Amino acid sequence: MVLRHLMRVLGDDPKDAANLSREDAYRAFRAILEGGESEVLVGAFLTCLRWKGVTVEELGGFADAARGMARIPCQGVPGLVCVCPSHDGHDQYPPLDVAAGIIAAGAGTRVLLISDRCVPPRRGLTASSVLESLGLSMTWDPSEAEDWVAKGGFAAVAVSGLLPALLALRRVRGDVVLRTPLSTVEKLLGPASSAVLIGAQEGPVLGIAVEVIQGLGHPRGIAIQGLDGGVIPSVRRRTRGIEISDAHLVPLTVEPQDFGLDDVREPELPMFGPPEDGYGTADNPQLVKAAGEMTLDVLSGGRGPARKAALLGAALILKASGRSPTLAEGVDSAANALDGGAAGDTLERLRTLLS
């Protein structure tokens, strides 16, 4: 049993725990994905990594194993940005990554949004919820995602469609409750030729995430500590990030007031009941409808904090792609695409494509 051996390597004391090599991490995650380890052992292994603290080498090995078993679309597609938010979604803020992605696509960037639906532990709203409300859909077929990107400039694909073995880990994730390295690995399944915009939680994971992206060969990328660990910056305060620029890691700060996009409140979802009763999850039709309406309002020219946050998210996508050298230019391009109708045209093109 691979994990049983590696658990001994990790040890039982966080202060003295050893790190896994990239090769050992690859073997471990390959064994997990192949289904050869018990759920109890998988949960214990992931929890050990959580309290020890995962390293760049370990995440790189996990990503190597996942990519080796996944069907990854859009290999070699020029100008592509993979947008990778938190897959367990949001229960307080709307998933505005769909609006940001469509705006960026309207500004001329190809966007592949990698997400999923009802992922534990939060099981919050994701791109799937918003697209469903807009009369669109997220695909589970990598070939279909590639076709949508080619014809519409935008696609949202389920990570469990790229790597079905992740579905078998849903119960483990729900039982462990804590976020584990799975929450980062599932964001690392974009083609190595693409630029990446990845959401990161607060703390040291920001630097680790961008180093892993760089180590996997992505030419450009941004890791950002957006709302709820997503890719959408705050409109109330500064948001920290790190950018891969000319093979260097460069600190990136999003100050909404610098672009006239600050607000006294964040774009927040309405509350239909306590989250512990399921009202804050993707199973709540009222919440799904509200998230879709907020996104449609942004794409239809509405004003307010949701528009501001979506423009900042779109600017990050455009900067990650290299189309906009600065965030200010990204904001201008995004606003022009939104107010000039290009984002709306992209939405209608996608509706026609998916009808």
Image (cartoon, rainbow, N blue to C red):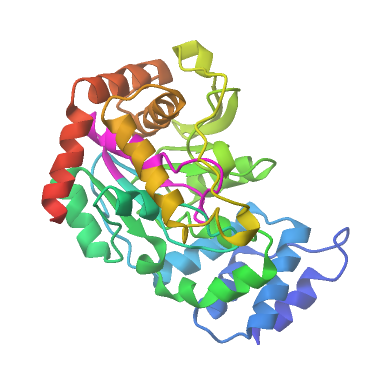
Q: How many marks?
A: 0
- Nearer to the camera, 230 or 211: 230
Residue 220 visible (yes or no): yes
Image-based side of 276 in relation to 30, left or right: right
The quarter of the rendered structure image containing the C terminus is: bottom left
| Rendered residue at 56%/80% (across/down) | 31
The quarter of the rendered structure image containing the N terminus is: bottom right
Magenta range: 83-111
| Rendered residue at 29%/27% (across/down) | 323
Decide: is 242 above or below 336: below
Residue 27 visible (yes or no): no
| Rendered residue at 69%/65% (across/down) | 20
The percent position of residue 312, horizontal first and vertical second, equals 43, 26
Q: Residue furthest front?
A: 272
The percent position of residue 285, horizontal first and vertical second, equals 42, 56
Q: Is residue 103 magenta?
A: yes
Image-based side of 339 in relation to 243, left or right: left
The percent position of residue 336, horizontal first and vertical second, equals 25, 19
Q: Quadrant of residue 314?
A: top left
- Nearer to the camera, 296 or 95: 296
Q: Is residue 91 magenta?
A: yes
Decide: is 305 above or below 10: above
The percent position of residue 176, horizontal first and vertical second, equals 68, 69
Decide: is 37 above or below 307: below
- Nearer to the camera, 25 or 121: 121
- Nearer to the camera, 104 or 213: 104
